[in-house]
Structures are given as C-alpha cells and as structure tokens.
Amino acid sequence: MGLLDAGISKHNVVITSVDNVLNWARLSSLWPMGFGLACCAIEMMATNASNYDLERFGIFPRSSPRQSDLMIVAGTVTMKMAERVVRLYEQMPEPRYVLSMGSCSNCGGPYWEHGYHVLKGVDRVIPVDVYVPGCPPRPESLIGGLMKVQELIRMEQIGLSRADALRKLAEKSIDPQPVIDAERQAARA
C-alpha cells in the first residue's frame, strides 16, 4: 500500500500510518553506491545514464558509502577485493541493502571453477537482499532488481526485523534460494 492509497478526508488531510510514510520516503530516495568490478559495471553505468533515467524512481547514485543505503555489487569479486567490499559495507549506515548483480557476484560466474582467487558469491562475505541474474544482466534486469529492493523496503515496519520483512516478501514471490542451492550443488559435483 502506497502513500497515495491511504484514505483522504476533508480539507486535504491524508490518513495513514507512520510506517507507510517512512517507507515511502525511504523507497522513493534510494542512494546506491555502485561497486563496479567487471563487465557488469558497464551495464550499471548504462542504467544510470539518460536512456533509463533512474532518477524517476528517486534513485541517485552516490560514491561515498557513508551517504549510501544500497550497495550494488557488479562483477567478479576476488578474495583480495572481498576485504574491501566488507569494509565498505560496514561503513554504510543502517538500514542498508545489498543488490548482487551478475553471475560473477552471485556465484562466481565462469571464473570460480578454474581460479582459486575468485569468491564463489558475494553472499559469503556480506548479506545479499536481491540477486539479479545474467552475464551481464541488461539494464532492465537491474531496474527490476531495484524495484525488488523497493518492495522489500515497503514491507518493513518499525520494530520488525529484516528477517521478518524478507519472510513477508517471500510469501508474495517465488523463493530463488532452492534454485541457487541446486545450482551450487550441481557445480560442486
């Protein structure tokens, strides 16, 4: 339920809950920190360009982790870079969200099988809220992932933990985790 879905009484007064107002303000002003590591970063930059115009969603990219509330990890994360990803994640203020973009950041991509240096998914070092599949994913896929983050924010309540919000969101959509686990098991075999 959005802010405009709330009841409007006489004299232009909007009647809604504090949760709806706070969540509407947060989901309408996402400030992502782009963490481009490989070819997925090109698609992330294309999404931020004028053809896709993320500012219509209230999404304004930032380069500082202290001003960001969303981290977009785009590309191959090596063991050496994983330390920097964790450091930047820890510098972000709460509430913070992570979007993993592309096969390399989701599960290591084509490189993890033949290289000891590639992290087999960024979710091994930081918690990931939304996965965007593809190699590299198109800008439309990234916009879809950003809209999933907005849905997650819309489900949050004051005093409700992140796990409860994810559970509520999972009730409305298909859970991708069994598919991811099956793919990981197949890759290990």
Image (tube, grey):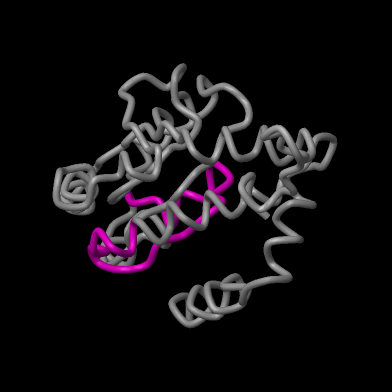
Instruction: State the residue in front, 53 or 135.
Output: 53
Horizontally, is 37 left or right of 6 in the view?
left
**Which is nearer the eye, 50 or 84?**
50
| 105 displayed left or right of 91 | left
Residue 9 magenta-drawn? no
- Does the stretch in magenta take in 120? yes
**x, y percent for residue 16:** 77, 41
Q: Which one is nearer the viewer's eye here, 46 or 27?
A: 27
Frontmost residue, 7 versus 161? 7
Q: Quadrant where the N terminus lies?
A: bottom right
Residue located farthest toward the right when viewing the structure as drawn? 159
Left or right of 90 on screen, residue 58: left
Q: In this view, does 145 lie above or below 14?
A: below
Task: Provide residue 33's location: percent of width, then percent of height.
Answer: 37, 32
- In the image, residue 75 sits, relative to residue 25, either above or below, namely below
Q: Name the quadrant containing residue 145.
A: bottom left
Q: Give the range drawn in magenta.
A: 117-142
Spot occupied by residue 64 in the image (x, y as percentages of width and height): 36, 19
- On screen, residue 66 versus residue 161, left or right, reads left
- Please give the name of the residue rendered at 55% of the width and 79% of the height, measured from the top-left corner: 179
Which residue sits at x=39%, y=28%?
Answer: 84
Q: Residue at x 37, y 67 (%)?
A: 133
Residue 182 % position (x, y): 55, 80
The overriding secondary structure of the stretch rendered in magenta is loop
